Image: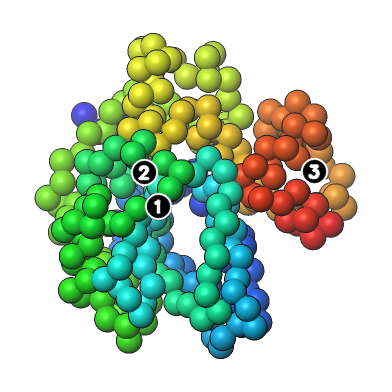
Amino acid sequence: MNNSIDIRKYFTPIQPNASERAENFIYQELSPALKLQKYIYCYWQFKTTEPLAEELHHIIVADGCIDIFFEMQNPQDNFVMGFCEKATDFLLSSSFNYVGVRFLPTMFSQIFNVSSKELANRFEHLANVVPSTSFFIREHIEPGNNLAEIKHIFDNYFLQLIDESNFDWDGRVYESLDIIFKNHGAVDIQKDLNPGISQRQLRRLFEFYIGDTPKTFSQVVRFQNILKAKPSNQNPKHQDLFFDLGYYDQSHFIKEFKKFHGVTPNQAFGK
């Protein structure tokens, strides 16, 4: 029985620090082929248009996803970045051109049968995790490829890979995810998630498929919904949004937001 849900319908993993175009670098996303959109959120590229004056501290916010990525000048040196429970600071050179594949939650583990827990809060050489995909990138991606060409290459590869994969649509996981997404992450894990197994068993399943606990993942989903809403201090309803999403008070919200974003809400939203 297929107990999967359309995660893409309920969840939009946002990377605001990349999405905001700056003078000397650009970020773009391309959706995969329609058949792949249940599994892959996007292919992305983050690159400089001219050398920066100095190295760039770039913050990756917590988004609940797992990414494959590589530098276009050296695609044979490719990596996978796991679920992160907090914002991560990367020091980038003054000139860079990164390309990646962002998998929707649970899908990296489903496609490659790899425990997400082993990748949590770190990045690893892809060759040590999925050597066949690392080899494919090395053999098929060339420095001169643009993102549209890379999308075509990856679409063909992942369509074949998914056709050959055996997916375990564990209803205990996906029913819990459905509740988390439909409540924008504002759930009481003990009361709202009741998949017919113990909390310890559910935690183990989430650690395998997601990379962390149901509680942490719910917090990330809640944070991502704040990013999507783009609240403003000028909007009289913005505090209602925080309370609706289960934050106890303003201090609670600011502390958790800073953990996942790396800066305070005022700094993030420019207020």
Circle 3 residues within 10 Å: few <14, some 14–19, many ≥20: some
Q: Is residue 224 left or right of residue 179?
A: right
Q: In which quarter of the image is the N terminus?
A: top left
Q: In which quarter of the image is residue 18?
A: bottom right
Q: Position of residue 265 (x, y in %)?
A: 75, 49
Closer to the camera in the image, 200 or 237: 200
Closer to the camera in the image, 83 or 27: 83
Closer to the camera in the image, 49 or 91: 91
Whether residue 160 appears in this view of the structure is: yes
Image height check: is 19 above or below 228?
Answer: below
Residue occupying image coordinates x 75% and y 40% = 254
Amino acid beneath label 3: His
Asked if marks 1 and 2 touch (Cβ < 8 Å), the reply is yes
The residue wearing badge 2 is 119
Label 3: element kind? helix
The residue wearing badge 3 is 238
Q: Where is residue 248 in the image (x, y as percent from the top left)?
A: 75, 26
Q: Residue 123 carries which label?
A: 1
